[in-house]
Each structure stands twice: as structure tokens, then as C-alpha cells.
Amino acid sequence: MANTNIFEDDAFASLPSDPYFAAHQLVGIFRTAHSQGKISSNDQNAAYIEAYEMIRQFCADSGVKLNTPRIGLTTNRASNIANIVGYFNNINAELEPEVLARKIQNETIQAQKDAIQRYIAITGKGFVYEFSESDFDQIQKLINHLRELLKKCGELGERHRARLLERLEALQVELHRKMNSFEVIWGYCIEASFAIARIGDAAKEIRETIKQIVSIVTIVSSGAHQLPSNTQPPFQLPAPKEDQPVA
């Protein structure tokens, strides 16, 4: 049976977290499907209209600003198909410079972070957070455990789960025994806690794993700032009704 959809059901669940990268990926899916003749001629009008409406809705929901004007759909199938193909080609040309600029910006930021980490590792100078070997091993185990919990948590929803898993992979890549900033760890823990706050008991083990990560990071942070080890971070993670709030 011929496929009648440009975007498969899981297309929106596996998108990059950056909305411009995600929109560009969706455009690529359409253009590849069109060039390869994925949709039969009898189904093209409906399939292409669906893809057109979905990309427009995605961009609107995600804050992707496009200058390419909307197209007028008619009662002529060939005209609709040609106009939609042209629309996707136009927004592809519009998105590519922004996507390239964002890739270069991400590479630059990562290169700066890597340079600081390497400088600290070589010289031992500069402000640094340093995990002990046991703490570093434990936080790696907790991240691996958290990854498995997120994969199994059906209540979370595909979109939230895919984003949290992608961000978790990025966190683990940036995790080192010596770090000049815990920004990525704090940011992930806060975002993940809000994402799971609405699903109650199903997220209890995820929440506990995040709390254990926060506990290790808090102790290391307190030591780096010459504070008592029981110093709490100046924020409170969302807790389910059955949990006691952090004092």
C-alpha cells in the first residue's frame, strides 16, 4: 500500500531541540519525499496540503519566523502541488543561512568551553568545580539510569521525552571531572523537573534520580565556593504532592 503522508507519525518526536534546525529537517523530509516520488499522484494533493499546513503550524508554534508568504490553495490539484513544492523550496532557501549561522555559533560556544576546560586541565588554574572520582562515577551512573527511566516513561509524551533525552546526551558530553561551570547541569535538572511535574507518581523514580544528581552537584558547588556542604541551591525543584518539599 502506498504511503499517503509526507511526515511519519514519529517525525515530530525526533526533531532537534533548536526550532530552526527542526524546521529545516522537516523541510528536508518533504523535499526528499517529493524528489523520490514517495507519494502517488492520486494522493499528492491531500498529502502535500497536509505537509504544508503542518510545517506552517510547527513554525508558528515554535517561534520560527518566515518571510515566505502563504500560498493560496485552489481547486486545481496540479496548481496546489506546484505551489506547495515552491513554498518548501523557498523556505528551505530562507532557513539555510539561519541554520548555518546557528551551527557556527554553537561550534564557537563549544570551542570556547572546550578551550577553558583544556586550559584548566593543563594548568590547574582558574575557578573550577571538581568532582571526586567516586562522585564523577556516581553521577555518570545516575545519568545513565535517568536515560533508561525517561525511555520507559510513556506518560511523558514523545515530544518531551525526545527533547529531554537529547539534552541529556548533550549534558553527558559536556560532563568532566573538572568544569568551570555547572550551568548545563543546573539548567537540565530544572527543565526536566518541570517537564515531569505534571505526571505525578509515574515520575517518582525520575524525580528521585534528579534529586540525587542535584545533591552531588550541590556538594561540589558548595566546596568550590567555600560554603558548608549542606548549603542548598537558591531554587526549589517541583515536588509531587506525596513528596515533602525541600526545607
Image: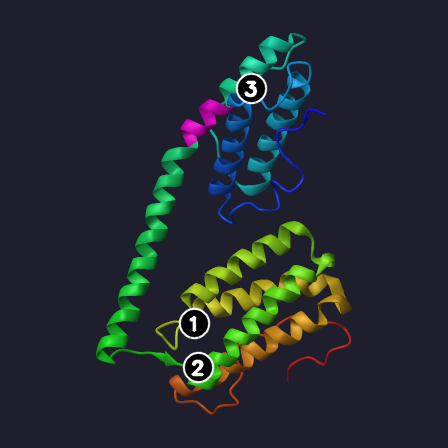
Q: Amino acid at mark 2?
A: Ser
Regarding residue 32, the answer to whether it shows in the image is yes
Q: Which residue is mark 3?
A: 84
Instruction: Decide: is 116 above or below 218.
Output: above
At mark 2, the secondary structure is helix
Closer to the chain start, of discs 3 and 1, is 3
At mark 1, the secondary structure is loop
The image shows residue 65 at horizontal and vertical percentages of: 48, 35
Q: What secondary structure characterizes most of the magenta part? A: helix
Regarding residue 239, the answer to whether it shows in the image is no
At mark 3, the secondary structure is helix
Q: Which residue is mark 1?
A: 182
Q: Which residue is mark 2?
A: 221
The image shows residue 236 at horizontal and vertical percentages of: 60, 75
Specify whether residue 91 is painted magenta: yes
Over which residues does the magenta segment extend?
Answer: 88-94
The quarter of the displayed image where residue 97 is located: top left
Q: Are marks 3 and 1 in contact (CB under 8 Å)?
A: no
Q: Amino acid at mark 3?
A: Ile
- Mark 2 surroundings: few (<14), some (14-19) or many (≥20) residues within 10 A: many
Rendered residue at 26%/78% (across/down): 126
Q: Amino acid at mark 1?
A: Phe
The image shows residue 21 at horizontal and vertical percentages of: 47, 42
Rendered residue at 65%/76% (across/down): 208
Mark 2 to mark 1: distance in Å? 8 Å
